[in-house]
Image: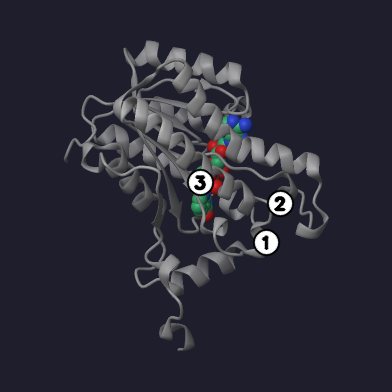
Amino acid sequence: MNQLLQGKRGIIFGALDDKSIAWKVAEKTVEHGANIVLTNAPMAFRFGQIEELAKQLDVPAIPADATSEEQLEELVDKAMEHLGGPIDFVLHSIGMSLNVRKKREYTDLRYDWMQKTFDISAISFHKVMQSLWKKDAMNDWGSILALTYIAAQRVFPSYSEMAESKALLESFARSFGYHFGDKKNVRVNTISQSPTYTTAGSGVDGFDDFYNYADEMSPLGNATADDCANYCVLMFSDLSRMVTMQNLFHDGGYSFMGINPQLKK
Ligand SMILES: NC(=O)c1ccc[n+]([C@@H]2O[C@H](COP(=O)([O-])OP(=O)(O)OC[C@H]3O[C@@H](n4cnc5c(N)ncnc54)[C@H](O)[C@@H]3O)[C@@H](O)[C@H]2O)c1
């Protein structure tokens, strides 16, 4: 096995259970020689299986609500202390919509819930990066990633306010990518992943249609969570040093298809 991340230190947000994309990313980064710290919202420690993953990988899991600046700054301190130095890579794998969860129509959204959705799913990414910035916690040539979905660019009606969350998230990657690049040669990108059966994914109405349509439309079919983890390893490795401020489609070609003649058959 290649050790693309040998000696690198990372923080992985968002492993809830063994279906989570972050779970697969955590496993792959450790396989590739990285030292990592896992984190998730305190609630996820009660309802999810993050502590099992921490045991399996023999790494710490530290609770932090990604909407809390204070908890994020504490997390960054603890992660650097545990890992023994500044951080080389960070995965933001966090998403949740209150209006989707409570099945509000897009034409009848509650704005207090929308603000909370944006805070959890997008502003948290800015908060994570600002905490790392303030603590000067990133190593030169480090890599920061967040996971997104093509509903930021195209209309998927049942994805609702998560579409705007993802548009905001992708914009934060570009804007903070400038500052981090300029200051520390750190790159910031988003990976736009195929529909994937996870807790967050399956919470969207009509998820089977999203999944099946994308799978049939894409010449390579849908990318799995394992495929996504491989791509994250590449993006955390030194093989992708000059890629920054990009939204990278990881979807078997779906994003650039117009019509697929196979669909008629
Ligand atoms: N599943 C898909 O189809 C798909 C497709 C494209 C992008 N994504 C994105 O991938 C990312 C990971 O989602 P997933 O599909 O693995 O589902 P998941 O449900 O396993 O992960 C979502 C995570 O967000 C965490 N979270 C929620 N609120 C939080 C908070 N306040 N603080 C810290 N963490 C919090 C949850 O505990 C959970 O671990 C999300 O950004 C999602 O939008 C998913």
Binning the other alpha carbons within 10 Å of mark 1 as few (below 14), some (14 to 19) or many (20 upward) gives some
Mark pair 1, 3: CA separation: 20 Å
Q: Secondary structure at mark 2?
A: helix
Q: Is residue 29 left or right of residue 200?
A: left
Mark pair 1, 2: CA separation: 8 Å
Q: Quadrant of the N terminus?
A: top left
Identified at 52% across, 33% down, the residue is: 49
- Where in the image, quadrant-wise, is ligand 1 located? top right
Amino acid type of the residue that numbered disc 2 sits on in the rendered structure: Val
Classify 198 as above or below 81. below
Residue under numbered circle 2: 100
Task: Please count the marks in the image.
Answer: 3
Task: Tell me where residue 233 sits by quadrant.
Answer: top left
Q: Which mark is residue 158?
A: 1
Q: Quadrant of the C terminus?
A: bottom left
Residue 14 in the image, given as x and y percentages of width and height: 51, 35
Cβ atoms at labels 1 and 3 below 8 Å apart: no
Q: Earlier in the sequence, mark 1 or mark 3?
A: 1
Q: Nearer the viewer, mark 1 or mark 3?
A: 3
Binning the other alpha carbons within 10 Å of mark 2 as few (below 14), some (14 to 19) or many (20 upward) gives many
Amino acid type of the residue that numbered disc 1 sits on in the rendered structure: Ser
Residue under numbered circle 3: 170
Cβ atoms at labels 3 and 2 below 8 Å apart: no
Identified at 32% across, 12% down, the residue is: 84
Q: Nearer the viewer, residue 98 or 107?
A: 107
Q: Nearer the viewer, residue 243 or 8?
A: 243
Mark 1 vs ligand 1: CB below 8 Å:
no
Q: Earlier in the sequence, mark 3 or mark 2?
A: 2
